[in-house]
Amino acid sequence: MQSYDIIVVGAGILGLSTAYRAQKAGAKVLVLDAGATAYEASSRATGYLSLRGETPAESPLAQEAEKLWDGLDDELGYPTEWTQKGRIWAALDEHEFADLQKLYRTFQKTDVPFEFLDGATMRKMIPCLSERCLGGIWTNRSGHANPQRTSQAFGWAFTDLGGEIREYTPVLEVLVEAGKVKGVRTPQGEIHCGNVALCAAAHNPLLLKPFGIHFPLAPVRLEALVTTPMPPLFEQAFIGNGLSIRQTKRGNIHMNGGPYEWINLEIGREAAKPTTQTVRNIMRRAIETMPVLKGAQFLRCWAGIVDIAPDQMTTIHRFDSPEGLVTAACSGHGFGMSPAVGVAASELLMNGATRMPIEQLSLDRFRDTPSDWRERRRWEAGQYNT
Amino acid sequence: MSSRKIVIAGASDAGFKIALAAHAAGHDVTLVDEHPQALKDMSFDAPWFYGAGLPSALMNDNSIAQSVLEASPQLMECIEAGIDVRVSTVLWGAFRNGPNCLHVGRPKVGLVTREGNEILEHDALIIATGVRDFVPSFKGWELPGVLGGKAGLALLDLYQVFEGKRVVVLGSDELALRVVRSARERGVEVAGIVEPGESVVAGPEAAAWLAAQDIPVHLGQVIAEAIGKTAVTGVKLVSLDNRPSEEIACDTVAVAIATLPNIELPAAMGCEMHYVADAASWIPRTTAQGETSLEGVFWLSDAGGGNGDLHTAILDRIGGAERDSRVTAAPSRKVSATGYITSWIDALHKTGGDDVVLCQCETVSRAEFCGLAPPQYLGKSLRHPQTPLNHGDDATAPRINQDFMKRMTRVSMGHCQGKRCRDEAIFALSLRFGIGLESIRPASYRFPLRPIDLTLIADDDETDDIRLNWQMWPYETRQG
Ligand SMILES: Cc1cc2nc3c(=O)[nH]c(=O)nc-3n(C[C@H](O)[C@H](O)[C@H](O)COP(=O)(O)OP(=O)(O)OC[C@H]3O[C@@H](n4cnc5c(N)ncnc54)[C@H](O)[C@@H]3O)c2cc1C
C-alpha cells in the first residue's frame, strides 16, 4: 500500500488550499473526497472575502487572506476572477439601519478602514440601488471571486505539483496507532500516512467523535440563485435587505439569503440539498434592493450546506492527541478565508506551528460549550429560521 | 376511493390520456403545458428547437391559440370534460418535503404565465413531459432557418405558420419522415434527406416511398455547413468517404435526427435516474405503478406512457394502493437513440473540425470545451493543459463530471442552461475520451425549468412570518 506524508480529507476549497501549500512545501499529499472535487459548499458560495468585522478576533487572518488573494491568479496559474472593488452593507429599512449601526461598532474593532455612509452616497457608488436605501457600511478593501474557478485553480495548481486527488473515495475513519495518526479507512481499503488534515466542513465533527473530540459545528442548508447576465451594474461585494448580491464578470447576478434549515449529516454520504419555493422571496428582496433587477431573468437556483460554529468563527486546530491531526472549518465564510487557512493548516501539519494569526481560533475556545448547544440554540436538525 | 388533487405536467399524448382517465376516476386534475409558448420562450429552443428564425405570425396570440385548439382534438376533449387545463403555463419548479427539507408543507408546483404566477398544492404529480429536439452543432447552425424536427412539426401542423419553401431534412428515421410528410402536405418542397448511414433508417418501405416521391436521399453524408449571411440559403454536405461535396439550395434545415425525453423536472426534483441507451438519456427509475423513487411522483415516458394498464396502475396507486416497489425496465425501441446520435456526432465532429461553436449562448467551440479553456472574456489561459478525466479507486464512479466541464468553460451555463448543447457535449466527451456515456456524470438540472422574468414570480404575498424571521448568513444571527 502506497503511503503519503499527508492525507487531506475533503476536496473543498479549504482542503485543496491546504493540500496545495503542503505539496508546495515538499510534502507528498493525497486529497480524498466522498464525491467530486468542490461539489459541496465550495462551488455553491456567492464568492465574497469577509474581512470579519463581525468577529474581530479573526480579522487578522482575513487580512492575511486578502493579501494572498491579491496575488492568487499568478500564484496558482489559473484565473479566479478576483475583483478587488470593496464591500458594502446597505440598510433598506429602519430595522436594518439600526442593526448596521450596531454592527459598525463591532467592525471598528478591526484595523480595516470601514466607513458609515448615508443613502445618497451609497447610491452614488451603486446607481441602481433603491431609493429606499438609508445608508450603511462601506470599505474599499476586499472583494469577490468565482468560487468554482478558484477551487479548481487550487486543485490544478496542486496536481501540477504532483499532488493526487481521488474523488468518490469517502473517508470512513481516521486510523490511529499508539496515539499517532496512521492513515484513513475508505471503502476501497486503508491508505496510510503520517498526518491527516480534516477539511470536511460539517463532516469534521463526525470524524473526530471516535476520539472523544467535540467540534461544535451545526450544518445548515441555505439557498441561492443566479439571473441571466445584466449590463455592468456594480462591482462591490454587496450585502443588504437580507441578501448577498454579486455581479459576476460575465454579468450574471448571484444572490443568497435566508431562509435556512438546520440539518444532520452522515459520514461519507452526500446530503440532500433541495431548494424550495422561497426562492421567490429572495427574488422579491432582490427587486426591492435593486429595482433594475425586474428586467433580469431567473436562471437557476441551488442550495448548499454551511458549517456554523457557535461563535460563527473560523476554527483551525492542531491536536496533541492524536498526534498528526489538524482540522479546519470556517463557519460559512471559508471561501474568502481559504488562501490563509491553507497556509495555516499546512504549516501546522508540517512544522507544528504557523506564522498565520490563529491564536484565538483553536478548538480550545469551545472547552465550555455544552454538548447540547444545538438544542439550546434552536439549531437542531429540522429547525427552520431559528 | 377518495378524490385526490393531481397535477399532470405535459399535454403529451400520454399526458392527455392519463388526464382523462384520472378525471373519469373522480380525481381533481390540473393539466399543465407550456405550449403555445411566448415568443421569448421559444427563442430558448426548449423543448423544441426553433432556432433564430421564428415566423412573425407567431406574434398573433389569438390565432395561434385557435390553431392549437383545432390541431389538438385531445386538448378540446380535456377542456370539454371539465379538466382544469392550463396552456401557455410553465411549470417552473416542484417542491416537497424530504430529507433536509421539512417545511414545504404539502407538495407544491410553481406555475407561471405571462400574467402572473401561482403555487399549486397537490397530492400527486404525473410527469408526462414528452420529448425535446436533439440538434447537434455544425457550422452555421445559429442561422435563422435551422430548426429541430419537433419545432418544424409544430410550425407546420400545430401553429400552421411555417414560412419555409424548400427544406433539407437531416436524419432518416421516423421523425425525419414525419417532417417530410407534413412539409409536403403543406406544400413545402423537400430538397433532400441527409443520412450518414448506408440506408434509410426508417426502413426499406420508407426508402421506396421517398424514391417514389422523387426526394433525393444523400446517404453516407452529413451537413458541413448551413450556408447564408443572414438566413439559410442552402446547405453544403460532406461525404464520409471523400466523394466531392454537394451543395443544395434551401431556406430551411430541419434537424430531425432524434428526440430526447424531457427529464428536467424529475431530474431537478431528485428522482433516482438511470442511463437508458435506447433513449440516449438518463430517465427516472419507475415501479410497475409508474412511480419514481419519490412517493407520489409518477413518470410517463414518451415511448410507453400511453399504455392504459399503466394508467390504471398509477391511478390505483394514487387512490391508495400499496407501493409496488418492483422496478420496471424502460420500454425498448426499434432504433437505439444512443447508436444513432453517436453516428451523427462522430461524423459531424470528424468532418466539421474543432472550431465549430458548440455552445451558442456563450460562444464556445468544441475545442475550447474539450480543452477546458476559460471563457474568452476573462482573457486568461491555463498555465498547464488539463484533462477532464477523473482517475479514482472506485471503478463505479463517474470518470467525467459534466458540471465541472460546464463551470470551467461555461458550455451549458448560458441563457438556455444547456438545452441546446448539453447532450452533444456529453457525446463529444464520450467520443473524445473513450468513456462510456453512463460513466459521465450529467450536469445537474435545477429549477427553474425555463428562464423566468424575476417580476413574474417574485413573491408579492410574502407572509409576516417570512418577512420578520428572515435572517442571513453569515453575517448575522439572532442570539437565542
Ligand atoms: C449559498 C452559499 C453562499 C456562500 N457564500 C460565501 C461567501 O460569499 N464567502 C465565503 O467566504 N463563504 C461563503 N460560503 C461558505 C463557503 O462556501 C464555505 O465556507 C467553504 O466553501 C468551505 O469550504 P470547505 O472546503 O470547508 O467545505 P466544502 O466545500 O463543503 O468541502 C468539504 C468537502 O469534504 C468532503 N467530505 C465530507 N465528508 C467526507 C468524508 N468522510 N470523506 C471524504 N470527503 C468528505 C465533501 O464531499 C466536500 O467536498 C457560502 C456557502 C453557501 C452554501
Image: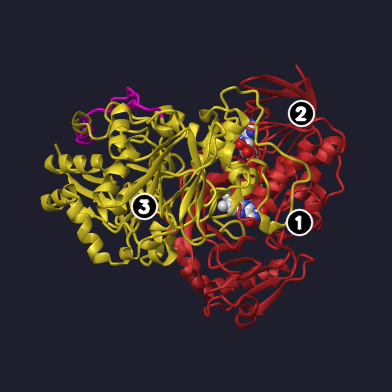
Chain colours: A red, B yellow
Q: Is mark 1 within 8 Å of ligand 1?
A: no
Residues rendered magenta in the picture: B313-336
Q: Which residue is mark 3?
A: B166
Residue at mark 3 to residue at mark 2: CA–CA distance = 77 Å
- B205 relative to B335 in the view: left or right: left
Q: Chain of mark 3?
A: B
Q: CA distance from mark 1 to mark 2?
A: 28 Å
Residue at 66% of width from left, 78% of height from top? A117
Amino acid type at image mark 1: Ala
- Residue occupied by mark 2: A322
Distance of label 3 from label 1 (alpha carbons): 65 Å
* Along the viewing direction, whichever of A239 and A160 lies nearer the viewer: A160
Who is closer to the viewer here, A220 or B300?
Answer: B300
Q: Amino acid at mark 3?
A: Arg
According to the image, label 1 marks what residue?
A: A62
Check if mark 1 and mark 2 are on a common chain.
yes
Q: Are marks 1 and 2 in contact (CB under 8 Å)?
A: no
